[in-house]
Image (spheres, grey):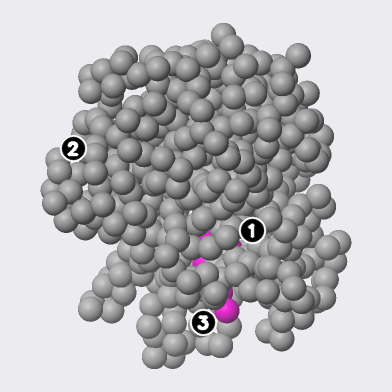
Amino acid sequence: MTAAPASFNFADVWEMAADALGDREALVVGEQRRTYADLETRANRLAHHLISTGVGPGHHVGLYLENCPEYLEAMLACFKIRAVPINVNYRYVAGELRYLLDNSDAVGVLHGPQHAGVLAGVLPDLDGVGWTLETGPAYEAALAVASPERPTVPDRGDDDRYIIYTGGTTGLPKGVVWRQGDAFFACLGGGDPMRLAGEVTSPAELPERVGDGITYLPLAPMMHAAAQWTSFMWFFAGGKVVLMEGSLDPAKLWRTVEAEGVNLLTVVGDAVAKPLLDAWDAMPEEERPDTSSLFAISNGGAPMSTGCKARILDRFPNVMVTDGFGSSEAGIQGSSRVSAADVPASGAVRFSTAGSKPFLVLDERDQPVVAGDGTVGRIVTGGRLPLEYHKDPEKTAATIITVDGERWLITGDLATVAEDGSVELLGRGSTSINTGGEKVHPEEVEGVLHGHPSVADVLVVGVPDERWGSAVTAVIQPAAGFMPTLNELVAHCKTQLSGYKVPKHLVLVDKVVRSPAGKADYRWAQATAVDAVTGS
């Protein structure tokens, strides 16, 4: 019988799973494979190496890595010794990297060889970074001379910190600081990754939640919260995690689904899902990989249009489509599920609040929105929340508020409440467009435009306009072989949207810019649209 973990600390729960599963395969990255025992031993060795460099409880370690086994090994090693792994965007240039390593108080950096040059250029400006370790020969040499035994670190528990940096596409990156005991429930599912059995109430219940496991493949990179959270929740449940290397290769992805028997695939909005579907459609039927193992395709990090969901359900009728709703600050807030037997909902994405963490939709007077009256309000969420933004008390105070003795987080999301009490998510208030006194939420318009066959990807922004104040503008990457016109897209939109939401300008681009995780870069879209429409 596997012993229960002492707490909900990530290292405690991982070690429970490693003890229970031993030789079961845990991780696949390209040609590299790790069992639970492999990951456990290598994480222990790395933990001892970190201790030898002076890393201890509370120290922050930068992970400047693309998807690789070392990413998971490093996270586990840090958790074991009560240090804090810091996710670093692997696409950062020198200035961005310098800011993040300084802001995060990193004492050392684990990096890939492809990033050595950029890192070397910023290190002279960072007094706090005392060491670096490059994956490859140097990393393996460090592990080879370190002990494989679990390090003994006093006082490991729920209060140990977990930090995830977020927000690089909408401003300077911000470090969201969680207690691991809170993040285990808010971010990692509380021992219930499928949302079926219910959250556990004590660590003693966790051994019975380690089952046969599923094979899970996240298409968000490990530097992104969604990939970290989902990977660890399936590790803790006995699953196998499959990570893709390099840029998105749709054909390779489908071959990997067959080769590894993937059960659950997570995409990041239409920007990832549509290329996968296009590649599938382009394959001769007799050459398509066997995807019979796949029972669910989940979405998170960016919206997925109704049209894209319909395509998934048409090509894979035995698959369930799940939309996740959450953020680095709020954790996982809710989800919606649809199967081929259902008619995909039109318009805004709708989430059930049943069984989710406490949250409200508040109007301008901070009163709960009346279900069914169409009022647009802001979402605030309660329950288990992060402690703060790292070194940013002003942002913390503006985002986490206390009402009647309870802490609530202002998510920045806007929504309405349907008559049945479900929440219809409209998008971020910071990106809404005020056109002629009416509010337009870009994600709603983007969802409709994604349904047009000539659109490969799209972002919607407002540009200055003398008559309207701000004119709705679609920045579109055309699908291969298409050259959409404003008139045809307007006609398409008018079948599903009110007239004031329909784009007044169309800007065609070679490629819509997104973060490596697939999130929209609205700053780029805004600048591109203004330059194209106004010539300034």
194 with respect to 412 (left or right): right
242 with respect to 367 (left or right): left
Q: Is residue 435 above or below residue 211?
A: below
Name the amino acid type tagged 3: Asn
28 with respect to 141 (left or right): right
Q: Which badge, 2 or 3, is on the more N-terminal residue?
A: 2
Camera-nearest residue between 149 and 258: 149
Q: Residue at x 53, y 63 (%)?
A: 388
Displayed quadrant of residue 421: bottom right
Q: Residues within 10 Å of mark 1 (few under 14, many from 20)?
A: many
Spatial CA distance of label 2 from label 3 is: 45 Å
Displayed quadrant of residue 6: top right
Q: Residue at x 43, y 75 (%)?
A: 462
Type of secondary structure dominating the magenta stretch: helix
Name the amino acid type tagged 2: Ala
Q: Residues within 10 Å of mark 3 (few under 14, many from 20)?
A: some
Camera-nearest residue between 6 and 241: 6
Q: Which badge, 3 or 1, is on the more N-terminal residue?
A: 1
Identify the residue under disc 3.
434
Identify the residue under disc 2.
116
Magenta range: 439-446
Spatial CA distance of label 2 from label 1 is: 36 Å
In percent of width and height, residue 327 lies at 57, 55
Q: Are marks 3 and 1 in contact (CB under 8 Å)?
A: no
Q: Residue at x 21, y 58 (%)?
A: 95
Identify the residue under disc 1.
385
